[in-house]
Image (cartoon, helix red, strand yellow):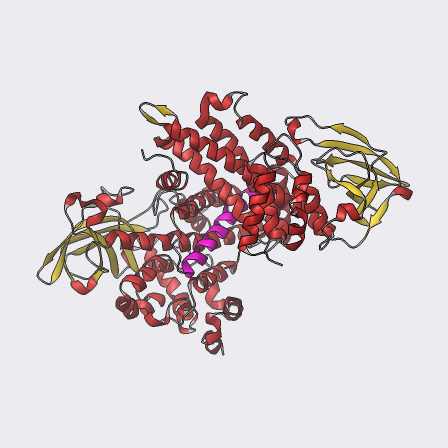
């Protein structure tokens, strides 16, 4: 019955009906959800493996096919369907599976610039049979991304890649990497960049996990030593790399804060619920302060998703969402830490480890995906019209 | 009924024409350009336009009276006139209502947005049966202009006692909607004040040259102003959302966030403008003074945080506004 509901074509245009049908399915499959709640491991691979259980169930029932265009293998509808899925999971205190974070930036980009590849891989990505990562940052190109030095040179009919990417999320569980590389002169800055899809099992690719301060191997390095990449793996055209990165980034600005706010509200749900019967329950004003840091981020990213779903480009103001995200992460997990002291600091075991992991991961929010210094500079120059420094 | 974009823009132009500044009360001019009619037709369009502009221009009016009454008496453009009333009495900060029943008497002590000595006053009163809309003669009131930190706001404290025989209870209104509606309107007014403060500081940062370049080119200055922008946009999206879902929560959140944005603007805009901003001559302190008065009406950020937090703890669930 449930898969029939999930395949009802009317759900493409009726988001409320989609939410209701999806919610009913999730409630009827709480055993699947329960496997996800409170699961913790310092090994990213173990997290991915556990989350695949949920992802394959969501795929088999058809829910994750909604929100993706039919011409790349989805069921139709738009980004609002996808956002609703993440929201409904978190309302049930289930974290958004990690690979859906990267998928949300990579697949809209593929659908736009390489629809054939999107068609070929969409189902494997949605089912989490595959995870892909983004190879953007380099040891000498972080905030100043346009100075990156990974090179791609055309040799007959193949591109040959040499270089070194770092801080690549989920690299150790990924099978492929979307790589931004220089195809122009070293001085060409953002004009001389192109985007490639590279298989991790290609000769010359080496990945190395990096353990984050959380204790988990969140990210890592990926090295390219004469890696040969077919011309069909050039996304868009030669020199389109920067435009593609910017296209991809607007999805990261829209959907990533939405996914995170859903998770942050779930954390606050746990705080009011689990702490309600304690001798010293949570201070109302502290709870409200944290809630008020998330609420505008929820609404603002919702507005961004609406614009993206309508085919509009959100513009520089979308940096507001990233600054709000960073503040909200710090507020919510700062509150969680204070509420769970001294268990947070002194206990062993998965519950304390889980909170500690999430706390440490939240500290990265002002840094990753364009630091909030970069975001505030963008806002000052491009929204407030202050001079470039 | 929702107005079309053209009508809203036309209305906004008229509003900008009459909310010209701090020196006189714009209530009559707003009435002349049909603010009450627009309010009745499309409150969602009218309120942001009037209150944001009132903040941006540091203007004053009794438009908040109309907002309060419209939520209880929707559909009629001249409530005050129909009830022979001159003004709505708003609660003093920290009070739930501006009046309460005490045996055979009604005791009132509230704030009016302008001093009025004739006609009747309307307010929400604590009665045996809960909060109710009441009207009573203004003549018996003791009235005092509120100077305080911003005498130019023209508030008056109106207090006194009337016999219940002279008090009329007006039935049928949604009295619980008044507080949220006023909070939302004041949130828009604070957002307007912050926008002007921010624009003024950004202008200064573009013009003021030190070390051979405009100070706005320095990242420390940029980031202070970007933080104000983020804070005010955060408040605005929540105010806009309060029309759709969980109005009481969203309106309290919007006023709280607007108050927080105002506090940040007061600090950061002054820092960017330096000594010039610190002078009496510069307008900045007038905006800060106005904002501080609005900040304490219908709940300061601190009070609102406590109220919101208690509501969430009571529910044992975090409200989710802003569904996709």
Given residues B129 and A22, the one toward you in this image is B129
User: Could you tell me which residue is drawn at 54 percent across and 47 percent down?
Assistant: A291
Given residues B308 and B36, the one toward you in this image is B36
> Residue B182 appears in which quarter of the rendering?
top right
Residue A341 placed where, x, y %? Answer: 51, 42
> Residue A102 appears in which quarter of the rendering?
bottom left
The magenta stretch spans residue A304:
yes
Given residues A158 and B71, the one toward you in this image is B71
User: Could you tell me which residue is drawn at 64 percent across and 44 percent down?
Assistant: B183
Residue A245 placed where, x, y %? Answer: 29, 53
Quadrant containing the C terminus of chain A is top left
Residues in magenta, as a range? A284-310
Q: From the viewer's perspective, is residue B88 above or below residue B77?
A: above
Residue A85 placed where, x, y %? Answer: 46, 63
> Residue A308 appears in which quarter of the rendering?
bottom left
Query: In the orientation shown, which residue stands out farthest toward the left?
Result: A156
Residue A39 in view, yes or no: no
- Dominant secondary structure, magenta: helix
The magenta stretch spans residue B264:
no
Residue B138 placed where, x, y %? Answer: 82, 36
Residue B93 in view, yes or no: yes
């Amino acid at each position: 019955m449930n898969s029939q509901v999930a395949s009802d074509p009317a759900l493409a245009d009726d988001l409320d009906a989609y939410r209701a049908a999806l919610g009913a399915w999730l409630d009827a499959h709480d055993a699947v959800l329960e496997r996800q709640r409170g699961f913790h491991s310092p090994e990213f691979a173990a997290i991915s493996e556990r989350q695949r259980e949920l992802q394959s169930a969501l795929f088999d029932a058809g829910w994750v096919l909604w929100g993706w265009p039919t011409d790349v293998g989805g069921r139709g509808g738009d980004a609002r369907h996808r956002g609703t899925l993440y929201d409904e999971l978190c309302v049930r205190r289930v974290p958004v599976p990690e690979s859906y974070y990267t998928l949300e930036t990579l697949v809209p980009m593929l659908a736009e610039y390489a629809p054939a590849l999107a068609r070929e891989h969409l189902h494997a990505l949605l089912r989490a049979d595959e995870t892909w990562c983004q190879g953007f940052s380099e040891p000498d190109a972080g905030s100043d991304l346009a100075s990156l030095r990974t090179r791609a040179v055309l040799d007959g009919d193949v591109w040959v890649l040499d270089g070194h990417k770092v801080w690549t999320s989920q690299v150790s569980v990924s099978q492929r990497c979307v790589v931004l590389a220089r195809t122009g002169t070293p001085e060409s800055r953002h004009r001389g960049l192109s985007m490639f899809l590279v298989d991790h099992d290609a000769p010359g690719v080496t990945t190395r996990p990096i353990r984050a301060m959380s204790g988990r191997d969140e990210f890592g390095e990926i090295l390219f030593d004469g890696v040969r990449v077919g011309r069909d793996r050039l996304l868009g055209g030669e020199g389109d790399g920067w435009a593609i990165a910017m296209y991809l980034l607007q999805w990261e600005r829209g959907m990533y804060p939405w996914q995170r706010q859903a998770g942050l509200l779930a954390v606050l749900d746990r705080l009011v619920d689990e702490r309600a019967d304690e001798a010293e329950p949570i201070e109302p004003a502290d709870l409200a302060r944290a809630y008020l840091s998330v609420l505008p981020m929820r609404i603002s990213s919702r507005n961004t998703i609406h614009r993206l779903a309508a085919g509009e480009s959100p513009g520089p103001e979308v940096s507001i969402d990233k600054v709000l995200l960073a503040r909200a992460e710090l507020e919510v997990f700062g509150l969680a830490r204070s509420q769970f002291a001294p268990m947070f600091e002194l206990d062993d075991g998965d519950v304390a480890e889980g909170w500690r992991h999430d706390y440490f991961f939240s500290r990265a929010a002002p840094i990753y995906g364009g630091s909030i210094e970069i975001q505030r500079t963008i806002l000052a120059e491009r929204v407030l019209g202050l001079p470039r420094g | 009924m929702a107005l079309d974009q053209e009508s809203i823009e036309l209305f906004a132009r008229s509003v900008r024409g009459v909310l010209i500044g701090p020196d006189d009360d714009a209530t009559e001019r707003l009435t002349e350009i049909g603010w009450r009619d627009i309010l009745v037709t499309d409150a969602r369009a009218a309120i942001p336009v009037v209150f944001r502009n009132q903040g941006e221009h540091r203007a004053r009016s009794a438009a908040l009276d109309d907002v309060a009454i419209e939520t209880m008496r929707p559909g009629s453009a001249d409530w005050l006139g129909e009830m022979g009333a001159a003004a709505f009495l708003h609660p003093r900060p920290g009070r739930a209502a501006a009046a309460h029943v005490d045996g055979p008497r009604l005791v009132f002590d509230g704030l009016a947005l302008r001093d009025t000595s004739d006609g009747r006053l309307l307010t929400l009163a604590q009665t045996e049966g809960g909060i109710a809309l009441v009207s009573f003669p203004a003549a018996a009131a003791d009235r005092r202009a509120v100077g305080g930190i911003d005498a130019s706001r023209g508030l008056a404290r109106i207090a006194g006692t009337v016999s219940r025989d002279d008090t009329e209870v007006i039935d049928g209104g949604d009295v619980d909607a008044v507080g949220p509606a006023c909070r939302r309107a004041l949130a828009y007014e604070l957002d307007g004040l912050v926008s002007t403060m921010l624009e003024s500081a950004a202008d200064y940062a573009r013009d003021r040259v030190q070390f051979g370049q405009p100070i706005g080119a320095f990242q420390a200055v940029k980031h202070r102003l970007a933080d104000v922008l983020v804070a005010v946009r955060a408040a605005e999206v929540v105010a806009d959302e309060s029309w759709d879902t969980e109005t009481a929560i969203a309106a309290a959140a919007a006023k709280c966030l607007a108050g927080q944005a105002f506090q940040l603007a007061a600090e950061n805009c002054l820092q960017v403008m330096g000594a010039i901003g610190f002078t009496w001559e510069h307008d900045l302190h007038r905006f800060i003074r106005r904002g501080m008065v609005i900040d304490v009406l219908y709940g300061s950020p601190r009070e609102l945080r406590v109220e919101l937090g208690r509501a969430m703890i009571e529910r044992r669930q975090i409200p989710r506004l802003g569904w996709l």
